[in-house]
């Protein structure tokens, strides 16, 4: 027997097939356990998209090809066998295309934000933006990162490769809960911070509102009251509102607006310890602490597994100080001649066209505020219009867009629609592979019946 035939025989052997199936069973079981203990994203990175899974699938395809070559020269009765094996290989090829080049993300549409042209996916990246004046930023550095597969440990920190910036990632923490603290700042671009208490006989809410820069607007909803601090302000008539204003001297004042009123019902200056009667549900507002220039810093609580409140975070060091950077957040770093923003973000993939929200409609269950059905009227790619509902997705170009959820504002009204966006380049191959495999099964019964017939 030639060397070629011996290799084919080995690869086509039943023993190897049993070993491959056993390895697949172990990997699938491990993936199921990891997903149950952590989440689907962790299971995908550690098991389903691991080098072990790719190697096993490659060995499976090699074995399937060897089995077909071992039957050469083929005869008509081999047709069912050949079709079934080719169908499996085509399905695996389609799955590989989906894994490598597919898109599975979300699109957040809001009238206030205008058109959107990027899909947010679960993959992550580090972005660094720089500015000479703190206003106009340009992207200086970007790098895809996967801290599940390639974690950063304290013994092997990572220095960002950006000229003029000394920013070091000391450790990646997959599951953590932020615990905020606020400190006074000496940086001129830093915003203000207010620690307030809103109380009545039934509730006591104590929290910080912190501007990360002097231009930022901060909002917080507490029961029937919307509290705002800084930034460009536009009256929201549907809600009761407490507006904190900061003058050029860094002094703070307030204005109380009752629902449906455009003029303040009460206003005045504030200092630490002052108490204000709001007139809403006997609520009293007290200023516990005020910092004209403040910086928001974090400590963390480490978790062994994810929870709805947890987030990935990075332990970082810059300008001689240590802090934590959370997913979809940023840290501002000041140097002698520039301002840098270091952001840890979900990756955004270009759609290839713009989409905007025209109208969002929600239908509640009778007598409740719980959504029974909701849909989005959208405009996309130069004036095209469509209605996307829970059971009617939009198919455009290579994307399927499904109605996934929505976000509510301070008064309970929907302020944004969230669409699920899917692009599966392997879908057609999986369909073709399934069809070819079904043909093989039909041929199997045909030749079996032909063989047993008199």
Image: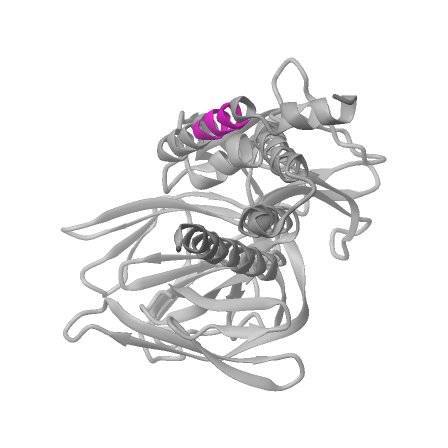
- Please state the extent of the stretch shown in magenta in the rendering: 17-25
- Magenta segment's dominant SS is helix
In this rendering, does residue 95 appear at all? no
Q: How is the image coloured?
A: one colour
Magenta stretch containing residue 20, yes or no? yes
Quarter in which the N terminus is drawn: top right
> Which quadrant of the figure contains the C terminus?
bottom left
Coordinates of residue 11 in the picture (x, y in percent): 64, 27
Rendered image quadrant of residue 247:
bottom right
Given residues 148 and 161, the one toward you in this image is 148
Q: Is residue 247 above or below residue 233?
A: above
| Residue visible at 20% across and 72% down in the picture | 365
Name the quadrant containing residue 166. top right
Residue 199 lies in magenta, yes or no? no
* Picture coordinates of residue 135, whole percent (x, y): 74, 56
Q: Residue furthest top?
A: 155
Left or right: residue 417 versus residue 266 is: right
Query: Residue shown at 42%/38% (left/top)?
Result: 39
The percent position of residue 213, horizontal first and vertical second, equals 61, 50
Residue at 42% across, 74% down: 236
Residue at the far front in the pictured view: 454
In the image, residue 164 above or below residue 292 = above
Count all numbered tags in the image, as a single digit: 0
Q: Is residue 175 visible?
A: yes
Query: Where's residue 417, x and y in %?
Result: 45, 68
Q: At 53% from the left edge and 60% from the top edge, which residue is drawn?
A: 435
Is residue 371 found left or right of 42 in the rendered image?
left
């Amino acid at each position: 027997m030639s060397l070629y035939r011996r290799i084919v025989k080995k690869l086509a052997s039943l023993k190897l097939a049993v070993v491959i199936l056993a390895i697949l069973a172990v990997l699938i079981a491990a993936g199921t356990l990891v997903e149950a203990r952590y989440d689907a994203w962790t299971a995908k990175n550690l098991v389903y998209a691991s080098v072990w899974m790719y190697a096993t699938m490659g060995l499976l395809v090699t074995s399937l090809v060897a089995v077909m070559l071992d039957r050469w020269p083929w005869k008509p009765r081999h047709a069912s066998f050949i079709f079934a094996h080719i169908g499996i290989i085509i399905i695996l090829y389609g799955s590989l295309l989906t894994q490598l080049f597919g898109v599975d993300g979300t699109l957040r549409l809001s009238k206030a934000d205008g058109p959107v042209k990027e899909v947010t996916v679960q993959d992550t990246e580090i972005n660094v933006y720089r500015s000479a004046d703190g206003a106009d930023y340009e992207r200086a550095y970007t790098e895809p990162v996967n801290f599940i597969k390639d974690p950063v440990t304290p013994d092997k920190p990572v220095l960002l490769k950006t000229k003029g910036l000394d920013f070091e990632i000391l450790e990646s923490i997959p599951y953590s809960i932020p615990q905020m603290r606020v400190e006074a700042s000496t940086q001129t671009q830093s915003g203000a911070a207010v620690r307030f208490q809103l109380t009545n006989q039934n509730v006591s809410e104590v929290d910080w509102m912190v501007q990360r820069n002097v231009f930022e607007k901060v909002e917080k909803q507490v029961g029937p009251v919307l509290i705002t601090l800084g930034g460009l302000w536009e009256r929201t008539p549907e809600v009761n509102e407490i507006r904190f204003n900061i003058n050029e001297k860094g002094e703070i004042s307030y204005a109380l607006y009752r629902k449906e009123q455009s003029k303040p019902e009460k206003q005045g200056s504030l200092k630490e310890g002052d108490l204000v009667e709001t007139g809403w549900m006997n609520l009293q507002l007290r200023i516990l602490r005020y910092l004209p220039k403040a910086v928001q810093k974090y400590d963390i609580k480490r978790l062994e597994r994810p929870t709805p409140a947890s987030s990935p975070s990075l332990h970082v060091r810059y300008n001689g100080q240590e802090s934590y950077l959370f997913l979809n957040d940023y840290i501002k770093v000041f140097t002698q001649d520039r301002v840098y923003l270091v952001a840890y973000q979900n990756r955004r993939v270009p759609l290839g066209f713009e989409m905007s929200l025209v109208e969002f409609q929600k239908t509640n269950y009778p007598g409740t505020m719980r959504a029974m059905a909701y849909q989005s009227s959208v405009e996309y790619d130069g004036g095209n219009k469509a209605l996307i509902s829970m059971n009617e997705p939009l198919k455009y170009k290579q994307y399927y867009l499904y109605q996934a959820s929505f976000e509510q504002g301070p008064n309970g009204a929907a302020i944004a629609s969230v669409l699920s966006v899917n692009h599966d380049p392997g879908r057609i191959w999986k369909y073709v592979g399934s069809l070819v495999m079904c043909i093989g099964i039909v041929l199997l019964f045909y030749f079996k019946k032909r063989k047993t017939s008199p």
